[in-house]
Image (cartoon, rainbow, N blue to C red):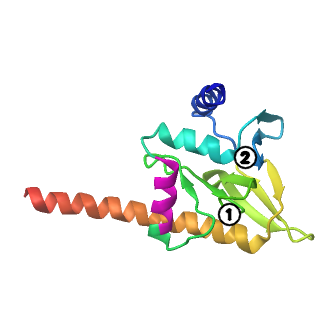
Amino acid sequence: KRKSVAMEAVAAETKAYRPLLIVSSYNNSEFIFSKDKTLKFPFSGMQWLEEVVIQYGASLQGRMDSFCHLTNAHQKPCILISEQTMNMYFPIRGKDNPENVFVYFNKVMDIQQTKNNHTRIYFGNGYSYEVPCDYRTVKSQMKRCDQFIHTVMQNKKNLVIDFREIYH
């Protein structure tokens, strides 16, 4: 119960200022906001994401199912936080991996492959971070996020047109 209250508080606190990265190792996470601001919490990134999406009237499982359905991708589902803002996080490993990094897709400006077959991610605030994941995987995750956002926006547009046809 206490952990749930703590997660709710962190989810509410981070609503206005989302972390660029969530580096999870089992039930501990580092929330990285910038070069100078990192917070540590005793819960996983998935647990935090679950609490955050609930604030927008959705379940984490529902968000993942929707992503898989609309993109036809069934590994490493990306998580839409809010349909209004289209803010998303993508994992670098599978959802069941206790050691994972969740990247705030909307803040990524560039990615580059490093010499050790990892990927350096550059964010809009000038911060960069090297994730232990190959470039191809990160690029694929970003492409899936783009595809998902495009599909959702197109579906919204089609829905508005359908309703206009019904009521006129």
Please tell me whether mark 2 sits on a helix, a strand or a loop: strand
Q: Farthest residue toward the right?
A: 115
In percent of width and height, residue 130 lies at 84, 57
Residue at image position (68%, 46%) is 45
In percent of width and height, residue 162 lies at 20, 63
Distance between mark 2 and mark 1 Cα atoms: 14 Å
Measured along the vertical axis of the image, is residue 73 above or below residue 79? Answer: below
Asked whether residue 63 is drawn in magenta, I would say yes
Asked whether residue 104 is drawn in magenta, I would say no
The residue at which mark 2 appears reads as 22
Viewer-side residue, 146 vs 47: 47
- What is the three-letter code of the residue carrying label 2? Ile
What is the span of residues highlighted in magenta in the rendered image? Answer: 59-68
Measured along the vertical axis of the image, is residue 60 above or below residue 75? Answer: above
Of the numbered discs in the image, which one, if any, rests on residue 122? none
Residue at image position (34%, 63%) is 155
Q: Farthest residue toward the front?
A: 1
Viewer-side residue, 44 vs 130: 44
The residue at which mark 1 appears reads as 94
Q: Disc 2 or disc 1, which is closer to the eye?
A: 1
- What is the three-letter code of the residue carrying label 1? Gly
Is 39 left or right of 76, judged from the image as shown? right
In percent of width and height, residue 48 lies at 63, 41
Is 145 left or right of 160, judged from the image as shown? right
Please tell me whether mark 1 sits on a helix, a strand or a loop: loop
Residue at image position (83%, 62%) is 132
Q: Using a 10 Å C-alpha cutoff, classify the residue at mark 2 as few (fewer than 14 neighbours), some (14 to 19) or many (20 or more).
A: many
Measured along the vertical axis of the image, is residue 131 above or below residue 23? Answer: below
**Rendered-image quadrant of the C terminus:** bottom left
**Of the residues under marks 2 and 1, which one precedes in the sequence?**
2
**Rendered-image quadrant of the N terminus:** top right
